[in-house]
Image: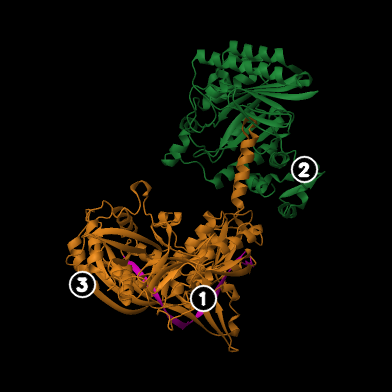
Amino acid sequence: MNDRLKYIRNFCIIAHIDHGKSTLADRLIELTGTVSKRDMQDQILDSMELEREKGITIKLAPTRLIYEYEGNEYTLNLIDTPGHVDFTYEVSRSLAACEGALLLVDASQGVEAQTLANTYLALDNNLETVPVINKIDLPSARPEEVKKEIEDVIGLDAEDCPCISAKDGTNVQDVLKAIIEKIPAPVGDENAKLKCLIFDSHYDNFKGAICLIRVFDGKVKKGDKILMMQTQKVFEVTEVGIFVPNTKEVDVLSAGDVGYLAGSIKTIADVKVGDTITSAENPIEKPLEGYKEVQPVVFCGIFPVDGAKYGELKDALDKLKLNDASLQFSPENSSALGYGFRCGFLGLLHLEIITERLEREFNLDIITTAPSVSYNVYKTNGDMLEISNPSNLPPAVEIDRIEEPMVKVNVFTPPEYVGSIMDLCQEKRGVYKNMVYLDKRRVELNYDLPLGEIIYDFFDSLKSRTHGYASFDYEFKDYERADLVRVDILLNGEKCDALSMIVHKDKAYTRGRELAERLKKIIPRQLFEVPIQACIGNKIIARETISALRKDVLAKCYGGDISRKRKLLEKQKEGKKRMRKIGSVEIPSEAFMSILKLDDENK
Amino acid sequence: MKDLSVYIHIPFCERKCNYCAFVSYCLSEEKQNEYIDKLIFEIKSFAKNDKNIKERVVKTIYFGGGTPSLLSIQNFHKIFKAINDNFKLSQNTEITIEVNPNSVDVEKLLEYKKLGINRVSVGVQSLSSRTLKQIGRLHDKKTALNSIKLISQYFDNISADLIIGLQGEKNITKYAKKLIKLKVKHISCYMLEIHENTKMLNLVNEKKYKPLSDDMVVKAYTKLSKFLTKNGFLQYEISNFAQKGYESKHNLTYWTFKDYVGFGVSAHSYIDGVRYENASNLKDYYLGKRLSEPKSEKTEIEERIMLGLRCYEGVSIKKLKDLGYNILENENCKAFLQKGILRKENGKLFLEPSYYVVSDYIIEHLI
């Protein structure tokens, strides 16, 4: 083997959310002196404010670590991966860039649904998976049991796996040792034709789209002409470099290396995660396997609170899309909310991240409508429509059948909650598939569920019914026929299109009633009584009434303090700006989203 | 001639009432004297610096608090001297003093009369001894009634304050009945507001005090306004009722954009279109700190709508137009007119009294 390759290790860390992935990455960076102690801040690879706050990794962040072991200097390329089901495809591509993975398991929580899902991904990519048990400093830590769990549930040898505390640094050296000893060095031929995998991309205002790449064969340097095999586009390389963890330009990236490549690529759409880069002059014949076109699965309408800010919203979405090819949007017009966009996301977390970024980074006040999935609607005339906005559903007489997306769901839970989870899946129209007792403390349940039910309130319900002990993961299965109808909401007799929803016929009454009840709570009293009706077609299925406003007056104008009262009124009026008017009824903008969240029982 | 109203803030109290968020202190006599000296200094410097002082005629003076009836007679003399030295008073200047039922006696009343005070506003708040104790007042029902009887021997123009919304006080109309019998000419009834940093807020949070529900407040208020209106009182502002000729001229200046100057800690002024607010703590007040809010058309429009709709006088459509706002083109205004919530008459807009209880909602939709 080539001597250079012998001292390279490419690895990633996979873990369930909260099991300490970013903290371990921090310790490794610190231990190898990649970042000086002075510049060290918590969770160094989570660069977005939002990532640090939510404790999750959204964008991939590779780092080159240099470590001396038994007299040799090793280059360890760490690729941090997002740990959330929404980003499974990105995870799978970053795994494909590695030879090995650290499987980080919390010493008190043990194996969780996501741990398993990510481990399978790693195994699918033929990665050497090294278990690491973290958080042994916690009083509730039970490393020996967790080791057994890893062996029984996942089937990995955990006998002498490192037991560490990434938080206080205990035994982290063992991790570095395990990386070098257990994870194989990359193989590749730097004299062969260029073959690189794009495992992520981001946008730089000066350099254009940046590809994060793993070189499998050949070399790439500034001035080379490269070909993107999926898009068939050719670019000239303007820069190659590595991450330490900030970018650092290098002369060349060769087989086995992880780094980045820039090439005056103007739009991120030209850089597809999973695509293969080769030489434009001397291309390889077959691209790397595993490329997938990423499809959004969750949709919602996004509207500016202030209708005049439509242009600003568009600019903001354009900018976010520069960095996030998976975000999709197209103009939409709602009679209730005016002009806005229908946006497609990889999942609910992705949706939440984008809406939060719009508000924080772009300072926009937005209204989001309840999330929906995309339905395949077959019309009697033979046409098929993909409907992600309930108000676009054709009249019932024109519909032959509707198909909805189904997902395979994997739930991990302590046995005492099996009953209530089964009830929940039943309520959510789930089809039972399998149940396995992994050990005394843990059961794995498999169900097929409509995605539309998952995005409704499945996650919150699951967490509340199991006191947070259950974890779940899902993957897309197929489209299946279902008996679906649209429930509309009338406020004071006027239809509010932004509140329409597509639901299963058997649930239409319950959901219509719930929605009407929730709206009653959310919509403030108006001068007049406001009836809220839920209906299917012309048939009213539920009714609630918001009684008229009784009292809204500050009786006293204190000894000439007119300003105070005026400011109070201005403030109240400011609050009203976030209201939308449907006919004569004012609705707070939060209503459009929060109506689909479960009521907080403590409220 | 330019009319001027003068407000004098006396921030002394024997104890603070549970609901009170006004600036007031329990001060020693020495500290009270110090305060009055500063107050007099403020009166003098205002007169010295006001470019219109020569044209001003003081139409009303109002001693508010705190508890002005705690102020010593010597200090009253000092203040009146300062006013007389620096301002021109009109023939029939309305001079009001706020008193607490437990802090008036014959001697004080006689002195007040000598000083020229001609209107007394009594902080009755309730005529239930239990309620009064609950909210931390120092008087009971009997003291309240007796003090009004006593005051009425010397003064004709008496006003009484009532609070709507106190725990258990579903019917305050019966109090109004008693007050009318005692020849009270003016009643202010304020709906209870629970402010930050008050004992009452803590009590409410600890569930030890339960104010009336909004619905009950509205009921009590509506019943009271009906009763007073029927008995010859004019509701000249949301919270104020008076027999003919007994409206508080002083309060009206606040609501009709006439000049007023406030002396004392936390006092407010409106002079030639500019609003001022004295510092709300003694230390800063003694340093002469105050805030000002310059004239702006936007704020004047908002204030005119806000104040006009709360008053019997209404708001002048032309005045708003002159300020650049054609309120009749406002969609909400059109809807309110159409629904009979607003009334247009003689170039003015009026809020129907039955909508006073939701006036903030209406005003927000018009500004």
Tell me residue A223's x, y (percent). Answer: 50, 69
- Magenta span dominant secondary structure: strand
Could you classify mark 1 by the number of other residues whose Cα lies within 10 Å: few (under 14), some (14-19), or many (20 or more)? many
- Discs 3 and 1 share one subunit: yes
**Which colour represents chain B?**
green
Tell me residue A227's x, y (percent). Answer: 49, 76
Look at label 1 and name its amino acid. Ser
Tell me residue A479's x, y (percent). Answer: 46, 82
Q: Distance between the residues labelled 1 and 2?
A: 52 Å
Look at label 3 and name its amino acid. Asp
Residue bearing mark 1: A374
Residue B180 part of the magenta-drawn span: no
| Near-viewer residue (A243 or B208) | A243
Q: What stretch is highlighted in magenta?
A: A470-495
Residue bearing mark 3: A152
B289 up-or-down from A88: above or below: above
| Near-viewer residue (B7 or A265) | A265
Chain ID of residue with mark 3: A
